[in-house]
Image (spheres, helix red, strand yellow):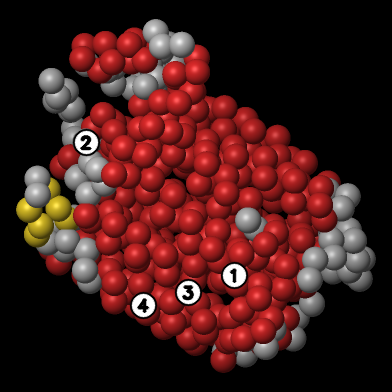
Amino acid sequence: MKIKKPKLSFWQIFNMNVGFLGIQYSFGLQQSAINPIFLFLGAKEEILPILNIAGPITGLVVQPIIGAISDKTWSPRWGRRKPFFLIGAVMGSLCLFAFPLSPTLWFAVGLLWILDVGNNMAMEPYRAFVGDKLPESQFSVGYQMQSLFVGAGILLANASIFLFQDWFGGGQEIEGTVPKWLYYSFFIGSFLSIATILWSVLKTPEIPPTDEELAEINKHKALPFVERFKVPFVEIGQAVKDMPKFMWKLSAVYLFQWYALFVYWQFITPLFRVSLGFDTSEAAAQAAKMSTTYNIVTAVVALVLVPLTLKFGGKKVYALSLLGTAMALFSIPYIQDPIYVLFPMVLFGIGWAAMMGIPYSMVSKIVPQERRGVYMGILNMMIVIPMGIQTLTFGPIFKNLLGANSVNAMLFAAVFFVIAAILAMRLNVTKEGGEYPLGS
């Protein structure tokens, strides 16, 4: 028996998604501050991709397993999804506090692994949490609200980086040490990681399972430990086998989209050392300004995309947004003014808003409620597998095919976004064996 879920008010949906602010602040630091810290601690540019492999591997392992486990979890006091993103937030908070204190490169790399476990543990149940709470008619609003908080969290992270660099930076860079101005951004992230999750946990009750769902959960709890341990892996395998055709098509889009995004995040700071002649601190601050700009745009346009997708269809808006992101990356290496180079980030921000909202809304409409957690985990696998491929392959590509030139790396990413846009035009939502374009 399906539960008839009541429509939520704007502020109820807002409160439900506040926790995403802290999670995305942490991801914002990973996009703009982690690689500069690696450079400060002595890493060479060609090893940046492999140093970032923690994200893809932990995402690949943690999110689908946590998704499958949370589908089979219920506590009258703590709920179904909340325990997981609360534990993940605590882990992330501790790691963010410690990260700028890293004495060596490999200490920082180790912390990144733990941080990514925490972030991924919080992320997947949060995606499923929105689908659990909202009726289908509010999926677009719910996931675009998440997109708004994606933009806001990353915006705050990046604004803190370039503001603290401006206020407290300067002086000679000392190889092997992290400059003090970077500490403050991480300390703020440590606080937000736990505080925003607590806000959503305390403000938003979860919907109890139906009698049938509760019986299935209790049946699972009664299994021996070894059997319970195997269940998530069995369910992931079965879910992949039963996966809708739409998600296989989306995986092709994600292969090129997320490969390209990882290239951008890793090489935007090295690019500015070439195109603008900046040192590492100045280049990191400029990269943070770029991210701040596109996330301001994301926060502004995230909810505007809802009526556009309803009118024109999700795949058209999504594909056009990806093409705009490609145009932005084609132009960035050739703009040699630190102000004018921010302008392409308008297109990037629109693309980022679409990437963070439209696919999740479309997938939520075609997967069954009782398997939403595992399918959201599988959707994340479609993100981290391309990232993992990038971390393993792009170092040699950068060194041997692109001449170890960060300008060429950015153009490479732009071409991949064009391919992703073309593939996105194949996305038709499948329901009950029929395939048709859905305006979602």
Residue matched to label 1: 393
Image disc number at residue 345: 3
Image disc number at residue 368: 2
Dot 3 or dot 1: first in sequence order is 3
Residue name at image x 17 percent, y 27 percent: 6
Q: CA distance from mark 4 to mark 1?
A: 18 Å
Q: CA distance from mark 2 to mark 1?
A: 36 Å
Residue nearest the observer in this picture, 307 or 207: 207
Report helix, strand or loop for mark 2: loop
Dot 4 or dot 2: first in sequence order is 2
Residue name at image x 49 percent, y 54 percent: 384
Crowding at dot 2, Cα within 10 Å, few <14 / some 14-19 / many 20+, comes out as: few
Dot 2 or dot 1: first in sequence order is 2
Point out the frontmost of discs 4 and 1.
1
Q: CA distance from mark 3 to mark 1?
A: 27 Å
Which quadrant would residue 298 be assigned to in this image? Answer: bottom left
Image coordinates of residue 178 in percent, x first then y, are 84, 57
Residue nearest the observer in this picture, 288 or 419: 419
Point out the frontmost of discs 4 and 3.
4
Report helix, strand or loop for mark 4: helix
Point out the frontmost of discs 3 and 2.
2
Residue name at image x 65 percent, y 65 percent: 49
Residue 92 lies left or right of residue 140; in this view the side is right
In this picture, is 78 found above or below 261? above
Point out the frontmost of discs 2 and 1.
1
Q: Is residue 381 visible?
A: yes
Q: CA distance from mark 4 to mark 2?
A: 30 Å
Residue matched to label 4: 419
Point out the frontmost of discs 3 and 1.
1
